Amino acid sequence: MIKFENVNKWYKTYHALRDINGEVNTGEVVVVCGPSGSGKSTMIRTINKLEDIASGTIRVQGQCINDKHVNINQLRAGIGFVFQHFNLFPHLSVKDNVALSPIKVAGQSKAQAYEMADELLEKVGLYAKKDDMPANLSGGQQQRVAIARALAQQPPVILFDEPTSALDPEMVGEVLNVMKKLAADGMTMICVTHEMNFAREVADRIWFMDQGELLEDTTSNAFFTQATHERAQKFLADIIH
Amino acid sequence: MYDFISTYGMMFLVGSWPGGPIGGFAGTLILAALSLTAAFPIAMLIGTGRTSEIGIIRHLSTVWVYVFRSIPLIMIIFWAYFLLPTMMKTEIPPFWTAVSAIVIYESAFLAEIIRGGLQSLPAGQVEAARAMGLGYFQTLFTIQLPQALSNMIPSLLNQFVSTIKATSIVYIIGVNEAAFSAQQINSIELTGTLRTYLVLAMFYFFICALLSRVAKMLEAHLTAKRLGQAA
């Protein structure tokens, strides 16, 4: 479904992504981990072209996204993205946040879009908050709305960029539970996170990155028990106290 | 003071209207309203252009802002007064000359306010909008401008007030407005200079104070709405 082939990226002289090769199949949950500054976020952001790449190719459902003829808005509409800082639109109510892309991008009728928004908010457990403004919600609730907003695009894949890193500890669980539910429903997910228990429980595969390189691409079981790379072993030792 | 007002009240209010062109306070209000109404959409274009990723648009907008922000309004008025008729090969009434000059001048300042408003939004807002597949203009109109404009109300108001006051300078090319009427009254009266200009000052003060009040209410309303407390 998503395929990296020799992807490189530089920030001026800084080599942010080094020869990334990897593939994510339909229905898989891939957790990307690694120390900060390792290029995890940069990598995930190249998939919907929030970041451009310098060389190599990225294919999403067979389509090479760096092709000049690709309609970037169409490409992005087919990829859900959940941000670390939620990025809800503060001037729109919860249900308007969720219904925005169905109305403006997919061209659905308002009635249809709000009906879908109701269902999705129900799914993330926030139907009761649908008329509230984002400012009235806790961080965990905002992130769940953001997930509902991504689902409203009806995308075949959702990317999560450290979805729980900006949350107070007591709110991490509610967001992870929603994500587990999605994984159980068979959603294809790529998730940059430091939540190792989530990785262990939910991930089909782990990608371990360090200094812009994709060093490990293994099943989560293999990663936690027999990580081959020294830096991965050190990372695991550091993160699991 | 009562005699003074009863003698010249109408002249202050509407100039020589209905016998002649409308002027006085009414003239100022019309001039200011027209100028702001025309300057604002132009400023939206230029201000947005200043944030454009397309080089030529950004450069042209920047030149517009730098040029007209750096020239005194009265210079622009003189240029418009002498240049416009030559260019258009026809006579242009002073009123429209004044409107053109004020629009050009104020659009430069308003554009900078709009640029600042757009750029002060968190980058994540645009990213989130683009990531869901919204295009450039959809993002601009549904995400950026609604938030930016409500954040900009205090600065916009500032500029509106300054524009209303700036219209007084166009009496110099004989436009019928409040300052022009005051000037006329002063030359009839000869002895009441202070009194005449006190009335004029009070007019500007009350209009601008009223506008500030309205803007404050609008701002409070928008803040309440964002916090989900609006009725």
Image (cartoon, rainbow, N blue to C red):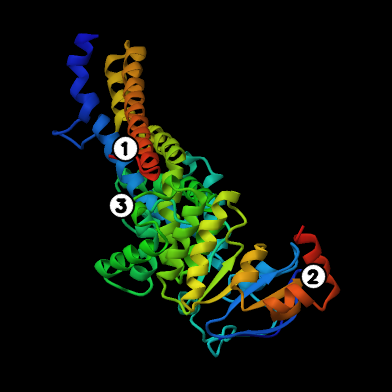
State the SS at label 2: loop
Above or below, B134 relative to B70: below
Whether the residues at callouts 3 and 2 have beta carbons within 8 Å, the answer is no
- Is residue A46 shown to the viewer in this render? yes
Q: What amino acid is found at the position of numbered circle 2 in the picture? A: Gln
Q: Which mark is residue B175?
A: 1
Name the residue carrying label 3: B91
Marks 3 and 2 share the same chain: no
User: For the image shown, how many numbered marks are present on the structure?
Assistant: 3
Callout 3: chain: B
Residue A130's x, y, as percent? 34, 55
Whether the residues at callouts 2 and 1 have beta carbons within 8 Å, the answer is no
Crowdedness near tag 1: few (<14), some (14–19) or many (≥20) residues, C-alpha within 10 Å: many
Nearer to us of marks 2 and 1 is: 2
State the SS at label 1: loop
Name the residue carrying label 2: A211
Task: Give the farthest residue toward the right.
Answer: A230
